[in-house]
Image (cartoon, rainbow, N blue to C red):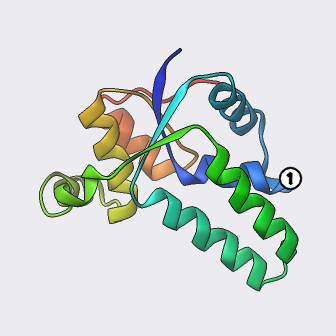
Amino acid sequence: MSRFVLDASVALCWFFPGQKTPYTEAVLNQVAGGDEAIVPGIWPLEMVNSLLVAARHKAIAPAQFDEFITDLKDLPIAIDLGGVSRAYSSIVRLCRQFQLSSFDATYLDLALIEGIPLASLDKNLRAAAKASGVELRRP
């Protein structure tokens, strides 16, 4: 069993068949198999917002939205609420250093604080993780 930071870019693919990849499916199987995924406090908001946008654009049906929300709540994912307290310090430094959004920097910050790998599809975030010495989660 291992721990890693889970970016929304990976988790959102689980709900959209056209976006699933072997990597995203492997990460889902790892979570389902007992590996501990940890996410920053913004993750639930990012996930819900993305699903709401998909529902508004009719990419998913209302019933699918409700099912996806239930599935999200049932996933064994730990939410770290401490990142908000680092918004004006380490997170803003990472934003400036790597030209990341505050949202992406929150994932990198959590991986650095916890000393654990990061699972992400975001190219800029992956590059910043590599430059920071953060291991990228392998499938």
| Vertical comparison of 109 with 115: above or below | below
For disc 1, the marked residue is 17
Would residue 31 be found to the left or right of residue 41 on screen?
Answer: right
Give the x, y percent position of residue 122: 53, 51
Give the x, y percent position of residue 55: 77, 78
Extreme residue toward the top, this view: 1
Give the x, y percent position of residue 52: 67, 77
Residue type at the position of mark 1 = Pro
| Vertical comparison of 83 with 45: above or below | above
- Which residue occupies 68% across, 22% down? 33
Residue 95 found in image quarter: bottom left
| Vertical comparison of 13 with 27: above or below | below
So how many labels did they put on this image?
1
Would residue 58 be found to the left or right of residue 56 on screen?
Answer: right
Would residue 36 be found to the left or right of residue 64 on screen?
Answer: left
Badge 1 crowding class, 10 Å Cα cut-off, few under 14, some 14 to 19, many 20 or more, is few
Extreme residue toward the bottom, this view: 56
| Vertical comparison of 20 with 92: above or below | above
Give the x, y percent position of residue 64: 84, 66
Which quadrant would the C terminus be assigned to in this image? top right
Query: Helix, strand or loop at disc 1?
Result: helix
- Which residue occupies 51% across, 48% down? 7
Q: Nearer the viewer, residue 27 or 38?
A: 38
- Which residue occupies 32% across, 42% down? 110
Q: Nearer the viewer, residue 52 or 75?
A: 75
- Which residue occupies 68% across, 79% down? 53
